[in-house]
Amino acid sequence: MTRKLTKDIILEGAGRRETLYIREYDAEVTIRPLTDGELSKIFSSIGSVPVKEDGTPDFSKIDISKNFEILRKAALEGLVEPKLTLQDLETMKFGVPEYIGIKVFEISGVVRSEEEAKKKVRR
């Protein structure tokens, strides 16, 4: 039987935390999924976003500078520990803020994880 959606179940998702290893720093950070409101704010900041057939954003069709921008914003919102500013993120080693942003999008259900993508290719 399907369970009834409750406020606790909804808030449970936003409270989820994951540890992410950052190879470039040989250190870990803590990230969380983004809420629908946060995702809407990020995507609306760059205008219209092309989507794939499955309804997920098609990042390959977004201008590269806009792609970097939304990934940094996702990292900024989804990074729990350490809590950084946008300026802090911009001083990180190249590619790290974007990597964090991609992982935040993955746990938020916006993009498929690498494992899910590999499984789909094998089928």
Image: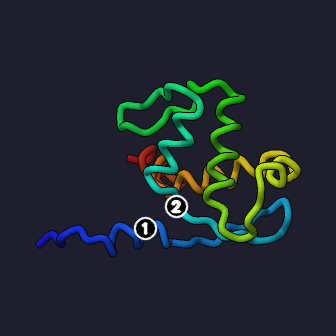
* Picture disc at residue 80: none
Q: Is residue 84 left or right of residue 48?
A: right
Mark 1 → mark 2, Cα distance in angstroms: 7 Å
Numbered mark located on residue 33 in the image: 2
| Amino acid type, residue under disc 1 in the picture | Gly
The residue sitting at 72% across, 29% down in the picture is: 65
Horizontal side of residue 109 vs 78, given as left or right: left
The residue at 59%/30% (across/down) is 46
Residue in the picture at 18% in, 70% down: 4
- Circle 2 SS class: loop
Residue named by callout 1: 13
Query: In the image, residue 28 lies at what x, y percent?
Result: 74, 71
Q: Quadrant of residue 68?
A: top right
Picture coordinates of residue 18, whole percent (x, y): 58, 71
Q: Could you tell me residue 42's position as x and y percent? A: 56, 42
Write down the quadrant of residue 11 in the picture.
Answer: bottom left
Query: What is the secondary structure assignment of the residue under circle 1?
Result: helix
